[in-house]
Image (tube, rainbow, N blue to C red):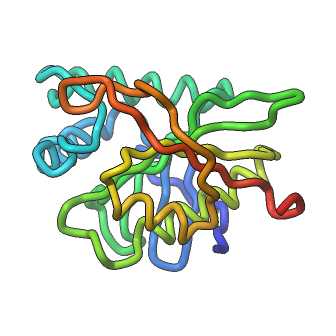
């Protein structure tokens, strides 16, 4: 999936890439209201598969802190937090982020993502994930990207397979989801020259 680095940034962005239909941006804390609105709208929709969050997570002050952390982490090369909007819209419709970036002999990271309940089934997350992974391989020189998904999350497993990831096994008690630690299925994607 192709992408291009955006020539112009919005006043609330520190970085952005574009695909055919989407804009993926690193947002400043001044955009915290849009992010909080997205999480509030999708709280119940995400609950089954999202990590456990306290009520404060869904507030404006908390999202300002998270976006400030996102920006600092992006600038120091430890996180690539890309918020998704349609190219012709302002509403946040999802996020794809790369974390646990390891350099040197590893050149690896993990990916996580979520989408707005009203924008599923349109291919947006496939487009965002494929372009963002291409970006990580090309611009960050990553060799390996990992994803960890609950076994019953069939839509996410289908998405990750469409994006070219390979099943690798199980991560036992990997993340606290909806009130308890859960096992996750592990997947990986290698840079194209090594496939």
Residue nearer the viewer, 74 or 134: 134
Residue nearer the viewer, 186 or 91: 186
Which residue is rendered at x = 73% and y = 28% of the image?
A: 102
Residue nearer the viewer, 163 or 174: 174
Say which quadrant the N terminus sits in: bottom right
Which residue is rendered at x = 37% and y = 44% of the image?
A: 150
Which residue is rendered at x = 89% and y = 29% of the image?
A: 105
Along the horizontal axis of the image, is 15 left or right of 175?
A: right
Percent across and percent down for residue 160 are: 51, 61
- Relative vertical location of residue 29 with respect to residue 37 in this rendering, above or below: above
Task: Specify whether residue 14 is in view.
Answer: no
Indicate the quadrant where residue 103 lies.
top right
Task: Specify whether residue 88 is in view.
Answer: yes
Say which quadrant the C terminus sits in: bottom right
Percent across and percent down for residue 99 are: 57, 33
Along the horizontal axis of the image, is 143 left or right of 45?
A: right
Which residue is rendered at x = 49% and y = 57% of the image?
A: 24
Percent across and percent down for residue 37 are: 16, 45
Along the horizontal axis of the image, is 43 left or right of 128?
A: left
């Amino acid at each position: 999936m192709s992408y291009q680095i955006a020539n112009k940034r919005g006043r609330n962005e520190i970085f952005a890439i574009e695909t055919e239909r989407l804009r993926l941006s690193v947002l400043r804390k001044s955009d915290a209201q849009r992010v909080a609105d997205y999480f509030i709208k999708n709280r119940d929709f995400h609950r089954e598969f999202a990590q456990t969050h306290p009520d404060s997570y869904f507030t404006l002050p908390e999202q300002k802190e998270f976006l400030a952390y996102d920006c600092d982490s992006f600038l120091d090369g430890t996180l690539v937090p890309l918020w998704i909007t349609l190219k012709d819209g302002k509403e946040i419709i999802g996020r794809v982020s790369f974390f646990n970036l390891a350099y040197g002999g590893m050149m690896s990271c993990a990916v996580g993502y979520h989408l707005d309940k009203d924008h599923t089934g349109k291919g947006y997350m496939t487009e965002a994930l494929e372009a963002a992974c291409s970006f990580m391989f090309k611009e960050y020189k990553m060799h390996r990207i990992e994803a960890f998904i609950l076994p019953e999350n069939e839509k996410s497993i289908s998405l990750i397979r469409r994006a070219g990831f390979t099943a690798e096994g199980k991560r036992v008690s990997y993340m606290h989801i909806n009130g308890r630690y859960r096992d996750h299925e592990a997947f990986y994607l290698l840079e194209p020259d090594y496939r």
